[in-house]
Image: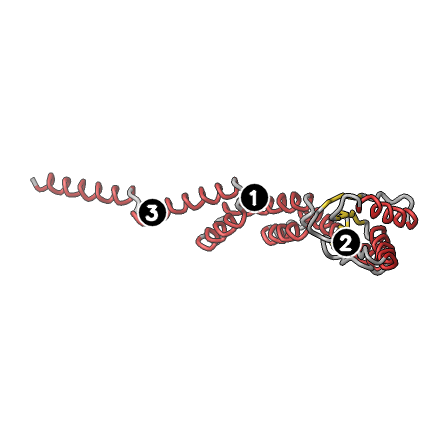
Amino acid sequence: MKPFASRYLLLVAFSLLLGACQSTPPAATEATDARATAITQLEQSLASNELATAEDQLATLQAQSPNDQSLEQYQRQLAEAYLRRSQIVLQKGDVNAAATALSRARVLMPKAPALTGGVNNAIVSARKAELDKAEADLKAAEAKPQAKVIDPTAESTTVALNLNDMAKLRRQLDAIAADVVNYQCDVSIQAPRTDDYPWLATLLTKRVKKLDPDFDLKLEKQILRNIPAQMVLSPRKP
């Protein structure tokens, strides 16, 4: 009996040892499952182009496993996604957004500056174009004569007409015509009587054509019984 009992105990001990070697501790299993879930969520964020979320998820994974080289592929994918975004928004004219996306791409792949070089040059050129345009607009604004009756920064300016004093009305129309030409204005003539429109339109048109025979004067007729005669000047948008 003794040899049999010894062999039995030895078999039981071996079975327990083998089971311990083959089983995974619950904590390790939970950690593996959590990591797999985190990677799946990262992949989903990249696929749906939620780059800020993906960047946070990647940073969390890298902090948990700083030596895990398998995360490098996700870092590169994220950098390339930022680079694509930079190119897209730059084509749409949003230089600031393009520069922001490019800076994120550079942070994520500092060892590959050549990959961001083309977009960077495009952003530099776009910024220069913006500055050149702003400078040209400023010079153009400075070159224009000072406005006589309108506010050049307003969408429109209403000028009440002095119909009871022809001398004052003529001076008003001279000033209105100058602003119409210099600031490329469309004009709405608003008058309480139908008969007022033709001669006011004629007086203004003669003055505008005298200043610029090629100017495309656009007039709108509005008969408004309850208001005095007036003209609304609206500078055309570029």
- Mark 3: secondary structure: helix
The disc label shown at residue 77, or none: 1
For label 2, the crowd category at 10 Å Cα-Cα, with few meaning under 14, some 14 to 19 and many 20 or more, is: few
Residue 210 picture location, percent across and down: 92, 49
Give the Cα separation between the discs numbered 1 and 2: 30 Å
Of the image marks 3 and 1, the number of the one nearer the N terminus: 3
Residue 94 picture location, percent across and down: 67, 49
Q: Nearer the viewer, residue 103 or 163?
A: 163
- Mark 1: secondary structure: helix
Res 238 seen here? no
Of the image marks 1 and 2, the number of the one nearer the N terminus: 1
* Residue farthest to the left, as pictured: 1
Vertical comparison of 158 with 115: above or below: below
Residue at numbered disc 2: 128
Vertical comparison of 154 with 91: above or below: below
Residue at the image position 78 percent from the left and 57 percent from the top = 150
> What amino acid type should be assigned to the residue bearing mark 2?
Lys
Q: Nearer the viewer, mark 1 or mark 2?
A: 2
Kindly indicate the quadrant of the structure image that contains residue 222: top right
Of the image marks 2 and 3, the number of the one nearer the N terminus: 3
Q: Nearer the viewer, mark 2 or mark 3?
A: 2
Residue at numbered disc 3: 30
- Mark 2: secondary structure: helix
Q: Nearer the viewer, residue 59 or 29?
A: 59
> What amino acid type should be assigned to the residue bearing mark 3?
Glu
> What amino acid type should be assigned to the residue bearing mark 1?
Gln
User: The N terminus lies in which quarter of the figure?
Assistant: top left
Residue 176 picture location, percent across and down: 83, 54
Q: Is residue 231 left or right of residue 181?
A: left
